[in-house]
C-alpha cells in the first residue's frame, strides 16, 4: 500500500474506533463479558487464564477500552461457557440458565455429555 493510502487507512481506522456507535458497542460488549464472568463467579484473572489472554486485556475489554479480535471473542465465549451468539445477545434470564446448566454438568459429568451449557443441544 502506498504511504498516502496507508495514512488514509490508519486515519479511517482511528476515526471508526472513536465513533459514538463503536464506543457504545465496546462498552456494551464489556458489560456483557463482566455480567457473564460474575454469573460464573470468575475473576478477570480466571477468565484470562481460561481464554489464554492477558488479564489486563480482559480488564480493558470489560471497561470498553479495548477491541477484541474474532479469535479473542471465540476464546472468551469458551472461557465463559457460552456460544459466540450468547456472548453478544443472550438475555439476562438465559445467563442464569446457562450457568445453572454448566454448574450441573460440573457436579454431574454425565450431563455434560448430554447437552452443551445454555444450548440444550446434544454433544
Image (tube, rainbow, N blue to C red):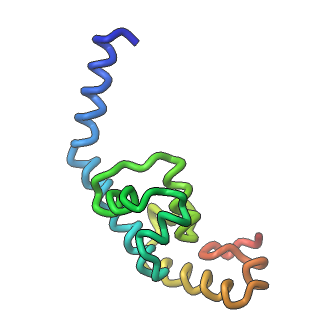
Percent x, y of residue 10: 29, 26
Percent x, y of residue 19: 22, 42
Left or right placement of residue 66 versus residue 48 in this view: left
Left or right placement of residue 10 versus residue 69 in this view: left
Name above or below for residue 72 compared with residue 99.
above
Residue found at x 72% / y 89%: 108
Quarter of the image with the N terminus in it: top left
Residue found at x 36% / y 59%: 56
Inspect this view and state whether residue 30 appears.
Answer: yes
Asked which quadrant contains residue 75, the reply is bottom right
Total tally of numbered discs in the picture:
0
Percent x, y of residue 99: 54, 81
Name above or below for residue 10 compared with residue 78.
above
Residue found at x 27% / y 19%: 7
Residue found at x 78% / y 77%: 113
Name above or below for residue 48 compared with residue 3.
below
Percent x, y of residue 36: 44, 73
Name above or below for residue 2 compared with residue 57.
above
Quarter of the image with the C terminus in it: bottom right
Inspect this view and state whether residue 29 appears.
Answer: no
Asked which quadrant contains residue 104, the reply is bottom right
2 or 29: which is nearer to us?
Answer: 2
Amino acid at each position: 500500500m502506498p504511504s498516502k493510502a496507508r495514512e488514509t487507512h490508519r486515519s479511517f481506522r482511528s476515526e471508526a474506533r472513536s465513533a459514538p456507535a463503536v464506543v457504545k458497542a465496546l462498552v456494551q460488549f464489556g458489560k456483557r463479558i463482566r455480567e457473564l464472568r460474575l454469573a460464573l463467579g470468575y475473576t478477570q484473572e480466571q477468565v484470562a487464564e481460561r481464554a489464554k489472554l492477558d488479564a489486563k486485556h480482559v480488564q480493558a475489554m470489560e471497561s470498553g477500552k479495548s477491541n477484541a479480535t474474532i479469535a479473542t471473542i471465540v476464546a472468551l465465549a469458551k472461557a465463559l461457557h457460552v456460544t459466540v451468539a450468547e456472548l453478544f445477545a443472550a438475555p439476562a434470564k438465559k445467563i442464569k440458565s446457562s450457568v445453572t446448566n454448566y454448574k450441573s454438568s460440573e457436579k454431574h459429568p454425565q450431563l455434560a455429555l448430554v447437552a452443551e451449557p445454555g444450548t440444550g443441544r446434544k454433544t
